[in-house]
Amino acid sequence: MTAHSPTRRTVLTTGVAVAGAAAGTVVLAACGGSDSGTSGSSQNTGPAPAGTTVAALNDVPVGQAKSVTVDGEPAILARPTDTTAACFSAVCPHQGGTVAPEGGVLKCPLHGSEFDTLTGALEKGPAETGLTPIPVKVEGQNVVTA
């Protein structure tokens, strides 16, 4: 009895199945989260790990705000009082423009939405909501993510 040789059809369909499985593995790997050594849940709980320095508290004058970056994303850091800070996303909820301090408000350059400098609350549309808060706290002389 001679050894059975695979047919062309068997080779092609097996090769497609193996290639499809490999591609599926690559896609699933790309969808997986990354564990960079942080403890706790693997769920995304905010834009940056707790304790990430946003800026020195003294970089922002009391009653004002400045543009910063938190975990690679544009943000606004405000200093309502001498010992407190607030932070929120600088991405306008209307159409994604980046707001910036202008006069006494945070203004979106795309359609003119305005937000409270110290709270991120909506003051003037067309946006329908305020800016998304980013939890922060004052730790020593720095403002860090909470």
Image (cartoon, rainbow, N blue to C red):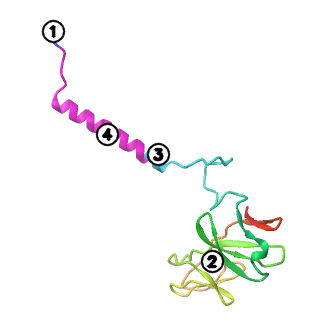
Q: Please tell me the numbered disc located at residue 19.
A: 4
Decide which of tag 3 and tag 1 comes sooner along the chain.
1
Q: Are marks 1 and 4 in contact (CB under 8 Å)?
A: no
Residue type, numbered disc 2: Gly
The residue sitting at the bottom extreme is 103
Calculate the distance from the C-alpha at mark 2 to the C-alpha at mark 1. Answer: 79 Å
Residue at 56% of width from left, 83% of height from top?
108
Where, quadrant-wise, is the N terminus in this rendering? top left
Calculate the distance from the C-alpha at mark 1 to the C-alpha at mark 4. Answer: 33 Å
Q: Which residue is mark 1?
A: 1
Decide which of tag 3 and tag 4 comes sooner along the chain.
4
Report helix, strand or loop for mark 2: loop
Q: Which residues are magenta?
A: 3-27
Q: Are marks 4 and 2 in contact (CB under 8 Å)?
A: no
Percent across and percent down for residue 64 are: 74, 82
Calculate the distance from the C-alpha at mark 3 to the C-alpha at mark 2. Answer: 35 Å
Decide which of tag 1 and tag 4 comes sooner along the chain.
1
Q: Which residue is mark 3?
A: 29
Q: Which residue is mark 2?
A: 130
